[in-house]
Amino acid sequence: MIKQFTTFSLLFCLLTVSAFSQQRIMTPVPDRVVTHPLPHNLISTRATMDTLIPNALGLACGDTVYSNPITDLWGFVGGTNEYGDTEKAQRYSFSEVSPFKVTETWVFFASASVVGDANISIKIYSVKSNGAPDVLLGTSDPVKASEILLDDQLVLPTSFTFSSPVLVEVPDFFVSVDFSESYNAQTDTIGIFMTGPNCGSGDDSWELFSTGDWYAINDQDSWRYNSDFWIFPIIEYEAPLNTTDAFVAKNGLQLFPAQPNPAYEQIGLPYELSNGTRVSIEIYAADGRLLRKIDKGQQGPGAYRENLSVADLPAGAYVYGIVTEEARIMSRFIVNH
């Protein structure tokens, strides 16, 4: 049975979209609408690891996630559906060309109605000149549809691991959920959480049709949505970083490695701003609980370092976020007393 959370009476604008000489005529009604902090309850201990998140999650609208089924038609906008969408892919941009590996991916599923129990997997692609997925770089270990994590109240990540981590040597790459096997069985219905239809650029979110064609989801041959899928890669660097190496950058916010890491009594969280913006810093426990939120107020362009006492934190892994008006970058540190 597909999990239900809340059904809103709000109807999004009628979309008329053509695909395969058909028309996508629909009035998507949010099946589940959840406002929830980004969970980080599957974090393992890796000293040089970071989690990239879609650009839209740095926006205010990114705190709310949606699951939009297609009214009067089978399936989900962010998943399997009548039109044979076999993959949903999210593009990420890294700040440096230095090689790194994708070791794991979190996907936040809204629905999984399982009959045939198809295999679902993650694929990593390079990026074509037109912005579409290009060369397949690697594939994760499969996860059964019945193993997808769902909850009536929470937004939970399902973890996909790579027996052979995928080496990425380019700054832009795609992470794609492949549920084509569920079409072969014609049994399993899968839905992925996504941001609202006007929360994100739409240029970073793509879908693969059964014809073999890729389309951005804001394309006239797709849903005409400007949204991001909740598909998050976890990356690991080839070698330890130092404070002069760029960690990750998005929308005018650049993050550098926390130092020292592991930390004992105090840790420094360095970051750099390209433009003036309000800044806050969030500290999360490994299970996703927000432990601290530090409001730094308005900060001008330049380099900053937040010196944080961790003497009162139990030993273990923690997630921190640097949040501006246009971006939120989440990284991690370890406390080892």
Image: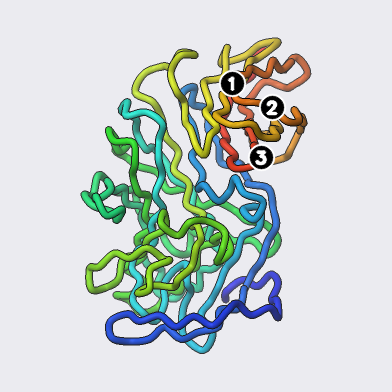
Q: Nearer the viewer, residue 1 or 55?
A: 55
Could you tell me which residue is drawn at 52 percent across and 20 percent down?
257
What is the x, y in percent for residue 247? Answer: 47, 26
Up/down of 185 relative to 238, above or below:
below
Where disc 1 sits, the SS reads strand
Say the numbered circle drawn on residue 287.
3
Could you tell me which residue is drawn at 37 percent across and 28 percent down?
96
The single residue placed furthest to the bottom in the displayed view is 72
Quadrant of the image occupied by residue 272:
top right
Tell me the crowding category of disc 3: few under 14, some 14 to 19, or many 20 or more residues within 10 angstroms, Cα based.
some
Quadrant holding the C terminus:
top right
Mark 1, residue position: 302
Mark 2, residue position: 299
What is the x, y in percent for residue 62? Answer: 61, 53
- What amino acid type is highlighted by mark number 3? Asp
Could you tell me which residue is drawn at 70 percent across and 57 percent down?
35
